[in-house]
Amino acid sequence: MASADQLSDFVRDALAAGHGDARIRAALAQAGWTTPEIDGAVMAWSAGGDLPPVPRPQPYVSAREAMLYALLMIALVLVCFHVLRLGFLVIDAAIPDLAEPGMIDTWPMRFSIAAILAFLPLFVVLDHRMAKQAVQGDQRRRSQARRVFASITVLAAALVLLGDAVSVIHAFLSGDLTLRLAVKCALVGVMGLLVAACYREDLDG
């Protein structure tokens, strides 16, 4: 029998015998189980009173939901990329660099606008659909795909923010921190903070 099964069976039997969570946790900790293992095993069962211990719903993995979250992530990445790209182009036009004379090519702007118009509605529809599932019981809270998506999204946003901070500090120390670079770094920082704020709470699901 696997260790996880042994742990789950012990918690079930202890609850059936009338022992409380505190005593069960203490016994497991004394036996050498880690806190996350104990939390997972204890939270998997609910004392049933005059009934046997009742199993709690466990996180699940749905292939269909994983596909939708993957599509949602791709749409989010593309929207963020093209918003930043369009923002950089607008900043370049608003704050021209005298060392770079010449006309600004508007083709990248048009392409980024087209990409945003294509992927932003897809992201909004998918995100609304996933959020709507939260109202229907507690299914979304038990989705492993949702937690993985949220974790990757917040991790990527944190890495972007760290890279942004490094760029600003390096430019400042090198004496290369121009107004154009500062505005671009501020745009990247705002985008990273918005993305992280949208999905940070989902990590607790």
Image (cartoon, rainbow, N blue to C red):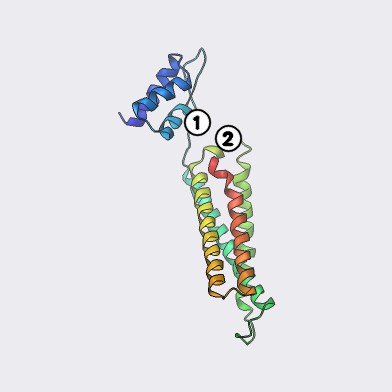
Tag 1 residue: 57
Compare marks 1 and 2 and give the one earlier in the sequence: 1
**Residue furthest to the left:** 1
Residue 16 occupies quadrant: top left
Which amino acid type is shown beneath numbered disc 1? Answer: Pro
**Label 2 near label 1: C-beta < 8 Å?**
yes
Give residue 171's position: percent from left, percent from top: 55, 71
Going 54% across and 71% down the picture, which residue do you hit?
Answer: 173
Which amino acid type is shown beneath numbered disc 2? Answer: Asp
Which image quarter is the C terminus in?
top right
Distance, label 1 to label 2, CA atoms, is 9 Å
Tag 2 residue: 138
**Residue furthest to the top:** 50
Give residue 191's position: percent from left, percent from top: 61, 60
Residue 97 occupies quadrant: bottom right
Check the image and report above or below for 141 versus 188. Answer: above
Check the image and report above or below for 98 versus 142. Answer: below
Q: Residues within 10 Å of mark 2 (few under 14, many from 20)?
A: few
59 to the left or right of 10: right
